[in-house]
Amino acid sequence: MAGKDRQITLRFLAEPSDQNFGGKVHGGAVMKWIDLAAYACAAGWSGHYCITAYAGGIRFVKPILVGSIVEVSAKVIYTGRTSMHIGLDVRAGDPKESERYLTTHCIVIMVAVDEEGKPTDVPEWIPSTKKDKRLRESAIRLMEMRKKIGAEMEAHVKS
């Protein structure tokens, strides 16, 4: 039901096919898992099909070893009229142990769309805890920074 579940955790087993030339999990595989979790979170919150509008601030903190269990946790940290900012943390560890270490974190912005592919309204998320209020404020600050960066990037894309 839309507007009820604001977070989800997906789990994957890092397979040999996810390996890069250095023997660790390829960043592209991690980014795919992030996109899948962001979609599942946004679709669950909005009750609509969602598309990725932005993925940024991705920070690879530690490598993931092949054979690790990987947990991608996603949660809504801000809602606009049709968009949702999803905060994501990726943790990994030996599947035989319960400890997981942070490997990656980022923010993804998803937009809910209707049957014709047009943006559609999403339920508003209102933070209630201090931590959630800080997350929302951080998302707003990052939104302002992206606007400034976007304006600067215009000089690079126009001839």
Image: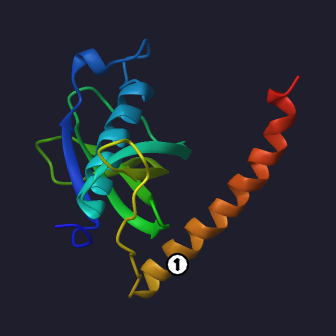
Quarter of the image that includes the N terminus: bottom left
Q: From the viewer's perspective, is residue 151 above or below residue 3?
A: above
Q: Is residue 152 above or below residue 129?
A: above
Q: Residue at x 48, y 66 (%)?
A: 81
Residue located at (32% from left, 37% from top) = 33
Q: Identify the residue at image location x=47%, y=50%.
A: 108
Residue 58 against residue 146 in the figure, above or below: above
The answer to whether any part of residue 91 appears in the image is no
- State left or right for residue 74 relative to residue 86: left
On the image, the x and y values in percent for residue 59 come to 53, 44
What is the three-letter code of the residue carrying label 1?
A: Arg
Q: Residue at x 37, y 65 (%)?
A: 122
Residue at image mark 1:
134
Looking at the rendered structure, the secondary structure element under dot 1 is helix
Residue 96 visible in the snapshot:
yes
* 117 relative position to 6: left or right: right
Q: Nearer the viewer, residue 158 or 136?
A: 158
Q: Which residue appears farthest toward the left when viewing the image? A: 96
Q: Is residue 136 left or right of residue 39?
A: right
* Residue 25, x across and y down, in percent: 35, 26
The quadrant in which residue 130 appears is: bottom left
